[in-house]
């Protein structure tokens, strides 16, 4: 059994060709490079035509399915296979699960572009309107046409931009021992370029930002216009407000003094005070909340999404406790985001990474190497991991953006 497939993109620089050939061999197939045209500059695209051979149809199907995720498409593509969803929130067996790469579906002789770029969704086709959408499983309705299998689906790696030199660090591997100076300088430059391009910077933060004393640094970055969106949980907002009201984080004075008596209740008192005011915004308007990250978000008009978890105290009024509603709220704030910086939060970093298209550059910072590695391994291959504590990273980022150091 054999099939010719075509590849087009930055096949050498992004190691796409080598990954395709490795996948063919690993799955029991063989290949012949029929033609290969390499771009003359780093911005030019390369093209390859491969003859893929397999001992039987099953192996060939497995090979084609695997390399399709890398952008390989049959020279003579077949239309996508569509089956109706059997019930609300239930998909046909073997439905196509999306990647975070630009995707198209072949229906009735036309390639339909999928507007959304998000991993682990279903592809739903509306023949009458001639459109294809990527939808979460829970939002698919009974009878809607769902793409099954890899046939008739093609994905493409985002085109390399002419000014992407500052993003070459995105291919850097995670290492706790790797020098941080050059990497941090590139992150600073990335933030500047994203803002100059008119795109938005998203901060995904955990409570370690407050515990390590970096809350005022983030507050300053928001007030200076470097951060345009904030995703977090109940904890970051709670301890930020606790610090603003009581000068503590989890009852421990941020100034370094000994914990005060009853300090363990400070975060609960902070939550209660905001619930009494009605909302974080109302607490700011009333003068109850006069500083901090959440105060900066409200006064500077920076949208935030607080997604809840099972262990939350309170929670604060704005915390979304319905996980599907939280996902929808997060998706609603991703338009125009060009860079996501994730700091000190495993849960929210991976959750946000699952929502982001591959074209959104991502920086994940954590003291635990396992967190930054996990984000990359779960499919956010555009992310770079930096192993360091939250305060050190944020202080150096802020200093770099001020032009210091």
Image: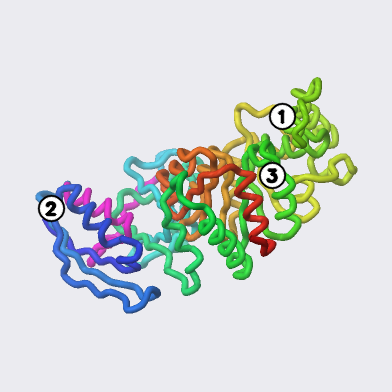
Does residue 70 show up magenta in the picture? yes
The residue labelled by disc 2 is 54
N-terminal of the pair, mark 2 or mark 3, is 2
The residue labelled by disc 3 is 214
> Mark 1 falls on what kind of element?
loop
Q: Are marks 2 and 1 in contact (CB under 8 Å)?
A: no
Q: Nearer the viewer, mark 2 or mark 3?
A: 3
Identity of the residue drawn at 54% across and 56% down: 181
* Residue 203 point in image, percent of width and height: 62, 50
Quadrant of the rendered image containing residue 291: top right
Which disc is residue 235 wearing? none
Q: Nearer the viewer, residue 368 or 288?
A: 368
Q: From the viewer's perspective, tell me whether residue 75 is left or right of residue 310.
A: left
Q: Nearer the viewer, residue 292 or 122?
A: 292
Q: From the viewer's perspective, tell me whether residue 137 is left or right of residue 210.
A: left
Res. 327 visible in picture: yes
> Mark 2 falls on what kind of element?
loop
- How far is the residue under mark 1 from the one under mark 3? 14 Å
Q: Nearer the viewer, mark 2 or mark 1?
A: 1
The residue labelled by disc 1 is 250
Q: Are marks 2 and 3 in contact (CB under 8 Å)?
A: no
Q: Which residues are magenta?
A: 59-84
Query: Which residue is outermost to the bottom?
Result: 40
């Amino acid at each position: 059994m054999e099939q010719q497939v075509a590849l087009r993109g930055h096949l050498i620089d992004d190691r796409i060709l080598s990954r395709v050939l490795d996948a063919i061999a690993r799955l029991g197939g063989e290949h012949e490079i029929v033609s290969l045209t390499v771009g003359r500059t780093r911005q030019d695209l390369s093209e390859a035509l491969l003859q893929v051979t397999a001992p039987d149809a099953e192996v060939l199907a497995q090979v084609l399915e695997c390399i399709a995720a890398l952008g390989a498409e049959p020279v003579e593509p077949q239309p996508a296979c569509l089956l109706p969803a059997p019930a609300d929130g239930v998909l046909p067996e073997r439905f196509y699960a999306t990647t975070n790469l630009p995707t198209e579906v072949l229906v009735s002789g036309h390639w339909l572009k999928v507007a959304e770029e998000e991993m682990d969704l279903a592809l739903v086709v509306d023949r009458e309107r001639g459109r294809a959408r990527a939808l979460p499983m829970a939002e698919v309705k009974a009878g809607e046409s769902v793409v099954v299998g890899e046939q008739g689906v093609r994905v493409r790696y985002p085109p390399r931009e002419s000014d992407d030199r500052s993003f070459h660090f995105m291919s850097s591997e995670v290492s706790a021992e790797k020098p941080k100076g050059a990497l941090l300088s590139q992150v600073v430059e990335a933030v500047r370029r994203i803002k100059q391009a008119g795109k938005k910077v998203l901060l995904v933060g955990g409570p370690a930002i407050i515990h390590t004393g970096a809350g005022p640094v983030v507050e300053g970055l928001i007030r200076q216009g470097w951060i345009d969106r904030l995703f977090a949980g109940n904890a970051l907002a709670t301890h930020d407000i606790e610090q603003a009201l009581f000068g503590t984080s989890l009852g421990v004075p941020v100034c370094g003094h000994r914990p005060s008596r009853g300090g363990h209740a400070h975060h609960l008192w902070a939550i209660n005070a905001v619930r009494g005011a009605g909302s974080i915004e109302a607490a700011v308007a009333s003068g109850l909340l006069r500083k901090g990250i959440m105060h900066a978000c409200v006064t500077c008009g920076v949208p935030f999404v607080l997604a809840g978890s099972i262990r939350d105290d309170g929670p604060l009024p704005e915390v979304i406790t319905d996980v599907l509603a939280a996902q929808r709220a997060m998706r609603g704030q991703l338009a125009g985001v060009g860079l996501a910086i994730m700091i000190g939060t495993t849960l929210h970093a991976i959750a946000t990474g699952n929502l982001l298209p591959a074209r959104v550059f991502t920086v994940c910072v954590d003291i635990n190497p396992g967190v930054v590695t996990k984000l990359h391994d779960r499919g956010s291959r555009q992310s770079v991991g930096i192993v360091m504590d939250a305060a050190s990273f944020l202080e150096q980022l802020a200093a770099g953006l001020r032009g210091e150091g």
